[in-house]
Image (cartoon, rainbow, N blue to C red):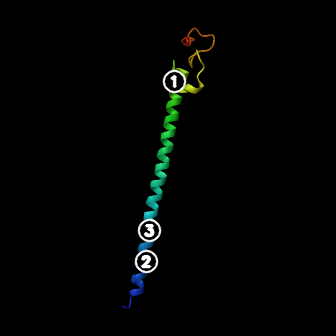
Amino acid sequence: MGKNAEYMILGYAAMAVILLGMVVWVYWRTVMARREELLLSELEAEQHVDSVSAAVGAMEEDVQPERATPGQSGMSGPTSEYVRTLPDQP
């Protein structure tokens, strides 16, 4: 072997470590970006529900159908003239 072969081997080893570190870093950033994208989509869906419920005339069952009060819209009180009635059920 040549006089500087040890330095060449050390150089290649250092480059391999750096390259491996970069590949791991890119993979980790991809995983974190996917998590952040999922979190943002959940927040957007929650914001949409909040904006629908805050809209004037929004119906409670449009926002949260499982928590809707029968015969009453989300914006009217029990003494309101806008109280809706349920259809007759056989």
Query: Can you tell which mark lies on residue 20?
Result: 3
State the SS at label 3: helix
The answer to which image quadrant residue 88 occupies is: top right
Q: Residue shown at 43%/77% (left/top)? A: 13
Question: Mark 1 or 3 closer to N-term?
Answer: 3
Residue closest to the eye, 50 or 65: 65
Image vertical order of residue 29 relative to residue 66, above or below: below
Q: Position of residue 62 (x, y in %)?
A: 51, 24
Q: Tell me how far mark 2 sits from mark 1, CA to CA.
A: 62 Å
Query: Can you tell which mark lies on residue 62?
Result: 1
Residue at the top extreme of this rendering: 81
Q: Residues within 10 Å of mark 2 (few under 14, many from 20)?
A: few
Q: Residues within 10 Å of mark 1 (few under 14, many from 20)?
A: some
User: Are the residues at dot 1 and dot 3 in contact (C-beta closer than 8 Å)?
Assistant: no
Quarter of the picture containing the C terminus is top right
Q: Specify the amino acid type for callout 3.
A: Leu
State the SS at label 2: helix
The answer to which image quadrant residue 2 occupies is: bottom left
Q: Tell me how far mark 3 sits from mark 2, CA to CA.
A: 11 Å
Residue at the right extreme of this rendering: 78
Q: Residue shown at 59%/17% (left/top)? A: 70
Q: Residue shown at 51%/18% (left/top)? A: 57
Q: Position of residue 75 (x, y in %)?
A: 56, 18
Question: Mark 3 or 2 closer to N-term?
Answer: 2
Q: Specify the amino acid type for callout 1.
A: Asp
Q: Residues within 10 Å of mark 3 (few under 14, many from 20)?
A: few
Q: Specify the amino acid type for callout 2.
A: Ala
User: Are the residues at dot 3 and dot 2 in contact (C-beta closer than 8 Å)?
Assistant: no
Disc 2 designates what residue? 13
User: Are the residues at dot 2 and dot 1 in contact (C-beta closer than 8 Å)?
Assistant: no
